[in-house]
Image (tube, grey):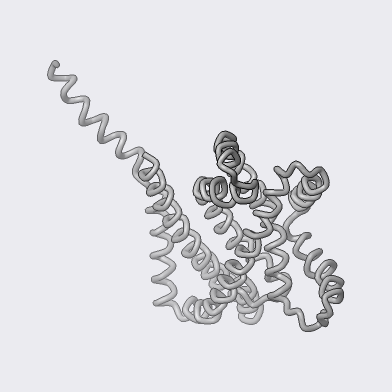
Amino acid sequence: MTGPEIQTQPDETWRSSWREFPWWLIAIFTFLALMGLLILRSINFNEAFKFIVPGIQVTLYTTMTAFAIALVLGLLAGLGRISRNTAVRNIAITYVEFIRGVPTLVLIFTVAFVIVPPVSGALGVDNRVVTANTRAIIALAVIYGAFLAEIFRAGIESIHKGQMEAARSLGMTYTQAMRYIILPQAIRNISPALGNDFIAMLKDSSLVSVLAVRDVTQLARLHAGSTFRFREAYLVLTFLYLTMTIMLSLLLRWYEQRIGKDRG
């Protein structure tokens, strides 16, 4: 090996490391650090932060509760999508395509004010006692249940058909084979996609502020409207959402890498 060839290898390694370095993460952390300094040192930013930050509890509660319900709806609809029963399969497809064909904000209004009242009446519940937060949770769950249905369907179909045939040949019923053999593998495969949808729901939960749910977005709107400090209110709101989503994204990346190592 000649001298010039020896010298080019460290240069190529350095250039590759330079290109692959997560500069985007540095930029985001720089923004978060600057916002943190503003909140600590500026009275206006500090007031906005103290007024808005209690809404995180409502935001997280709404997101986690809605996502838990959406998981159940998505699993049922996903199983319905691959069902051999024509009626069940078409009902599941109708649900998924209907939700995917209507904007999220329109669906939130529709579920909250059109679907919830008659359903609560049929269940013997006074519509007036159904809170705005409950309506928001139901709306997000119904909407994301359709998105998760496609993820579950893809995950189940990614498992080789031979595993179902082998389970049935061992005497398992279809339900037992799906529960103990297929679904555990499918859920493991789609867990990163489920994590991405959870982050997406966390961001979309900002839309429930239109129902007057006192989440971080609604509190930011109230603070901006009462003080006319729009810059402080919405920069703090951006700071809070970005902090939550970047932490979840990094956690999801770590989980994906761990899954990759386990598979390797």
Q: Position of residue 212 (x, y in %)?
A: 71, 76
Hey, which quadrant is residue 38 in on the image? bottom left
Figure label count = 0
Quarter of the picture holding the C terminus: top left
Q: Position of residue 253 (x, y in %)?
A: 43, 51
In this view, the residue in front, 206 or 192, is: 192
Q: Position of residue 187 (x, y in %)?
A: 54, 50
Q: Position of residue 184 (x, y in %)?
A: 52, 50
In this view, the residue in front, 220 or 77, is: 77
Q: Is residue 14 above or below residue 81?
A: above
Q: Residue at x 78, y 52 (%)?
A: 95
In the image: residue 112, left or right of residue 6: right
In the image: residue 83, left or right of residue 191: right
Hey, which quadrant is residue 55 in on the image? bottom right
| Outermost residue toward the front in this view | 171
Quarter of the picture holding the N terminus: top left
Q: Residue at x 49, y 64 (%)?
A: 244
Hey, which quadrant is residue 51 in on the image? bottom right
Q: Residue at x 39, y 65 (%)?
A: 33
Q: Is residue 182 above or below residue 14?
A: below
In the image: residue 124, left or right of residue 168: right
